Each structure stands twice: as C-alpha cells, then as structure tokens.
Amino acid sequence: QVQLVESGGGLVQPGGSLRLSCAVSASFYSMNAMRWYRQGAGKERELVADSTDGRGTSYLDSVKGRFTISRDYAKNVLYLQMNNLKPEDTAVYYCYVDQLLESRHLVYWGRGTQVTVSS
C-alpha cells in the first residue's frame, strides 16, 4: 500500500509563508490525482489544490495567486507552497493521492498537518 508522510506545518504570522511536503512511498508516474485538502475547526473539508495527470493544476478561488501545488518526480514528494498566508487559512491540511489500477480506484490520505496563521 502507498504511504503518505506530511511535514511543514506550524505557526506563522499573517503575510508569512510555509511549504508543506508530502512524501509518497510510490512512483509519481503511477499516480492519477494528487491533491491538498484542508479542514478548519468546525468546518467542512475543502479541496485547496489539485494536480491531476492530463488536467494540469487547479485551486480553490480564495487561494489563487497565493498557493502553488507541485510534484517532484525524482523524490516522490508533493508540495504546497503557501504565500501571503491569512488567518482564514488556519486548518489541518491533508495530502491525498489516488491510483487507477485495472478496475480499481485506490485512494490514500495523509494524517494531516496543522497550519495556524495568527499574529
């Protein structure tokens, strides 16, 4: 099975930056969608950034121009670069990947990493 290990979360002041990392225990060439989700306290989980094979990248409207998702194919690490952070970005951020193997759709989640934006 695929293992996902996240890192990079923490406390940052408004306007600051963080880079989240998600190390994946399988080749990125076998992956379909690779995504970052987040869930704020008392709120629903929402898709923040998507990188799907053949479809490029897409972002939640409120993070466009501030966040960038990228894949390092050599290291099998998924990144989320977050700039100009706002208090509204405070949430647990989750890494997600999936695979399409024969007739199966396999989904894997990271355990989540806390991002807190506060002065």
Image: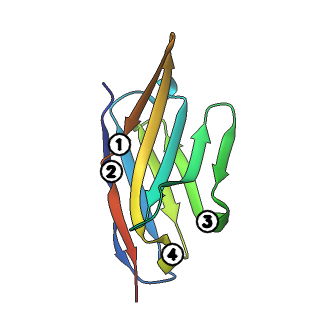
Which residue is depicted at the point 40% across and 84% down? 118
Q: Quadrant of residue 51?
A: top right
- Amino acid type assigned to the residue bearing label 4 in the image: Glu
- Amino acid type assigned to the residue bearing label 3 in the image: Val
Instruction: Kindly indicate whether the residue at mark 4 contacts the one at mark 2 (C-beta within 8 angstroms).
Output: no
Question: Which of the two marks, 1 or 3, is nearer to us in this view?
Answer: 3
Does residue 76 appear in the picture of this structure? yes
- Amino acid type assigned to the residue bearing label 2 in the image: Glu
Does residue 8 appear in the picture of this structure? no
Identify the mark at residue 23; answer none if there is no mark. Answer: 1
Instruction: Kindly indicate whether the residue at mark 2 contacts the one at mark 1 (C-beta within 8 angstroms).
Output: yes
Q: Position of residue 6 (x, y in %)?
A: 33, 50
Measure how far apart labels 1 and 4 are at the Cα level.
Answer: 26 Å
Instruction: Kindly indicate whether the residue at mark 3 contacts the one at mark 4 (C-beta within 8 angstroms).
Output: no
Image height of 20 relative to 12, above or below: above
Q: Secondary structure at mark 1?
A: strand
Q: Residue furthest front?
A: 42
Measure how far apart labels 2 and 4 are at the Cα level.
Answer: 21 Å
Specify the quadrant that holds the C terminus.
Answer: bottom left
Q: Position of residue 5 (x, y in %)?
A: 30, 45
Measure how far apart labels 1 and 3 are at the Cα level.
Answer: 23 Å
Identify the mark at residue 88; answer none if there is no mark. Answer: 4
Specify the quadrant that holds the N terminus.
Answer: top left
Measure how far apart labels 4 and 3 are at the Cα level.
Answer: 10 Å
Q: Quadrant of residue 48?
A: bottom right
Q: Position of residue 28 (x, y in %)?
A: 47, 30
Question: Is disc 3 surrounded by few (<14), some (14 to 19) or many (20+) residues within 10 Å?
Answer: some
Q: Which residue is mark 2?
A: 6
